[in-house]
Image (spheres, rainbow, N blue to C red):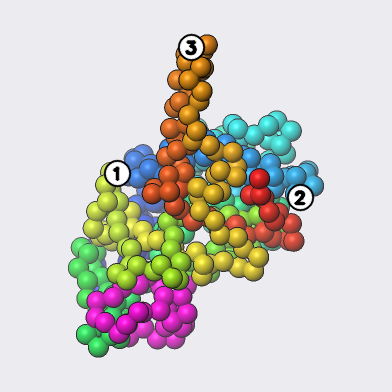
Amino acid sequence: MTHDWCGWRDATERALYGPGGFYTSGDGPGPAGHFRTSVHVSPRYAEALATLLCRVDASLGRPAELALIDVGAGRGELLTGVLAALPEPVCSRVRPYAVERAPRPAGLDDRVTWLPDLPAPGSLTGLLFANEWLDNVPVDVAETDEDGVPRYVLVRPDGTERLGTPVTGADAEWLSRWWPRPAAAPGLRAEIGRPRDAAWSRAVGTLRAGLAATADYAHTRDTRPPFGTLTGFREGREVRPVPDGTCDITAHVALDACAGPGAERVSQRQALHALGVDGSRPPLSLASSDPAAYVRALGSAGAAAELTDPAGLGSFGWLLQPVGGVCTGLLTP
């Protein structure tokens, strides 16, 4: 393995998506074996997406073919859950697409089209959804030197870092607009989100009409963390980010920078409540009349509470981008 210094964007690209990378290797349990996303918490997440897809379908006038595109599909868990939750009149018209660089998993529903990259621009009508995808789009990291000048952070495969050249050009303009420094102090860090802005714009562009939505760890211009958020995950634990292919490398997303015209930003808690995910406990009377149903309802309520916890998954940011002049106000109760 080479030990050359490079920026975090290039290092992460190789570590996650290069030959035998963290996401491209077909071995092992996939991402679910290393971290737990909303998709893995409960079927209620997929049920909420099925509700959203039905609302998109109605807004589009119930087209003969309705696309459901899952970007960063993992092992296809979310698509499998949504297809199981859809009513038959909608499910019969859905064409599901999984966009994922890893190989197609064995046993996946034959209806799912597995793609290594996004479909062609303007080719589909329906719902595009990306759960915790943008946080894995590689970005460069900047850190201020002793004079307060932002410089690119260089890294080796073992995670050793040093400062490189000053940040200039479009990257400097992005930092100035979207991640301004409170003071010219040394040691301040930021993730330069331009590649994510471009990736999201391209994803939205695959739709001819419909809704593009993404859910992710997020922050906004007025809440940027002063030392960045770059980190790693391995086997369910947060670890030091090391770009050698053995761990996930992730950083929170500047969703406000990604947002296009007419986009809506809400918390996951707000979005899921609007889609019918309620963490309220079932009535105690059900325990007497139907104990088994009470236990099931209690478990469902617990999962819903975890998905909408304002101190946890509920604090995730959702970005909803309507395309083609339709699919607005879909989270209005």
Residue 129 in percent (x, y) is at 57, 51
> Does 118 sit left or right of 60 as displayed?
left
Q: Which mark is residue 84?
A: none
Q: What range is drawn magenta here? A: 165-194
Spot occupied by residue 321 in the image (x, y as percentages of width and height)? 62, 60
Please report the residue visible at 39 percent of the width from the left and 48 percent of the height from the top: 312
Assess disc 3: are there few (<14), some (14-19) or many (≥20) residues with their C-alpha within 10 Å of its C-alpha. Answer: few
Q: Nearer the viewer, mark 3 or mark 1?
A: 3
Q: Quadrant of residue 143?
A: bottom left
Q: CA distance from mark 3 to mark 1?
A: 38 Å
Q: Circle 1 sits on which residue?
A: 236
The earlier-in-sequence mark between 2 and 3 is: 2
| Amino acid type assigned to the residue bearing label 3 in the image | Ser
**Circle 2 residue:** 60
Type of amino acid under label 1: Gly
Secondary structure at numbered mark 3: helix
Would you name the residue on which mark 3 appears?
Answer: 288
The residue drawn where x is 52% and y is 11% is: 289
Residue at x-position 27% and y-position 51%: 238
Instruction: State how far apart marks 2 and 3 are (Cα).
Output: 45 Å
- In the figure, is residue 297 to the left or right of 24? right
